[in-house]
Image (cartoon, rainbow, N blue to C red):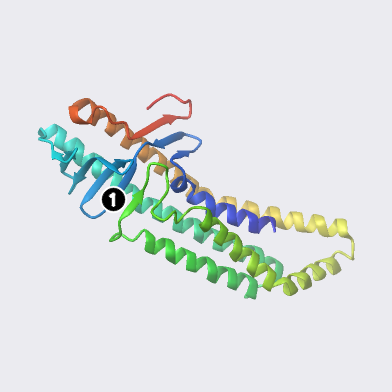
Amino acid sequence: MKTLLATAILLSSTTAFAHDSSFSSDSCNVDLDAGLRINKSTVEFSKNDKALYKIVNDRALYVGGNQISLTSSQQSLVSEYSTSIRQVVPEVKSIALDGINLAVEGVNLAFNELLGEGNDVGAELTTQLNLIRDEVDTRFASDKEFYIDENGFMDDDFFGDEFEQRIEEVVETTIKNSLGSLLIAVGQEMLFSGGDMDALETRMENFGERIENEMEARGEDLGKRGEALCHSVLKIDALEEQLKDEIEQLSSFNIISTSDSSNHSI
């Protein structure tokens, strides 16, 4: 059960920053102070249902509905800012999908160890998690619009409480439907332990620790990618500061705020 709980937490953590207007890691903190909409042609920021400014085709800057005339230096900054923001979305998708893949691996490691290869419990959980993975893949498709409001919620709050509840229900339903198999497995473990409950408890704790260590090792790369994503946002914030300094019409906006691990502004 400990491993299953860790699996659910893992799934939630991969998308936590999409459900909160601030994202924190060991090395940086990021706050978004406006809604962000990204589609094929436009990157747009808004607040209280009012457009603040937008960048069209990674070039044209509009503030308050008016296109701003840009110097070549300003144009270069605007283009870099827009493309940098766009590049974050596919990486968010990739990390979310790989997080689910890692959860699937954890499920199979756990139940293959407990019930043997090809068991129905692991197969059912894998099927259900893969269905959720397909939904995430579709939601982040390159031809679809990406939107997160100033409170950090995506569209219909896809990654909100209902998403977490769905993960929990998948796990709970599968366990409930497979209770017989699990009880038989526990009974077999008791036989191997000679009926000694302390020995069984130790055996199960060691089993949980092995799975946990294995998943931590496999999840290292995912953690590093999360850090890299965070640093990409730090660079976007630095670009925003340059834009504010160089383009008067943007000087009053502070959409992205970041700080490093020492809580000093970037």
User: Can the viewer see residue 174?
Assistant: yes
Q: Reply above or below: 266 against 86.
A: above
In the rendered image of this protein, does residue 99 appear above or below residue 45?
below
Q: Position of residue 188 (x, y in %)?
A: 81, 71
Residue drawn where x is 15% and y is 43% of the image? 59
Judging by the rendered image, the residue that carries numbered circle 1 is 38
* Front residue (pair 139, 111): 139
* Amino acid, disc 1: Ile
Locate residue 224, reporting x and y percent. 47, 45
Query: Does residue 68 sit above or below 93 in this rendering?
Result: above
Query: In the drawing, does residue 183 fall left or right of residue 69?
Result: right
Q: Position of residue 245 (x, y in %)?
A: 23, 25
Q: Quadrant of residue 75?
A: top left
Q: Residue at x 59, y 65 (%)?
A: 170
The local crowd at label 1, few if under 14, some if 14 to 19, many if 20 or more residues have their Cα within 10 Å, is many
Residue 109 x, y percent position in the rendering: 62, 63
For image coordinates 28% across by 61% down, the residue present is 143
- SS category of the residue bearing label 1: strand
The quadrant the N terminus occupies is bottom right
Which of 26/134 is in front?
134
Question: Residue at point 35% right, 53% down?
Answer: 90
**Residue 260 versus residue 137 in the image, above or below:** above
Say if residue 218 shows up in the picture: no
Q: Nearer the viewer, residue 150 or 195?
A: 150
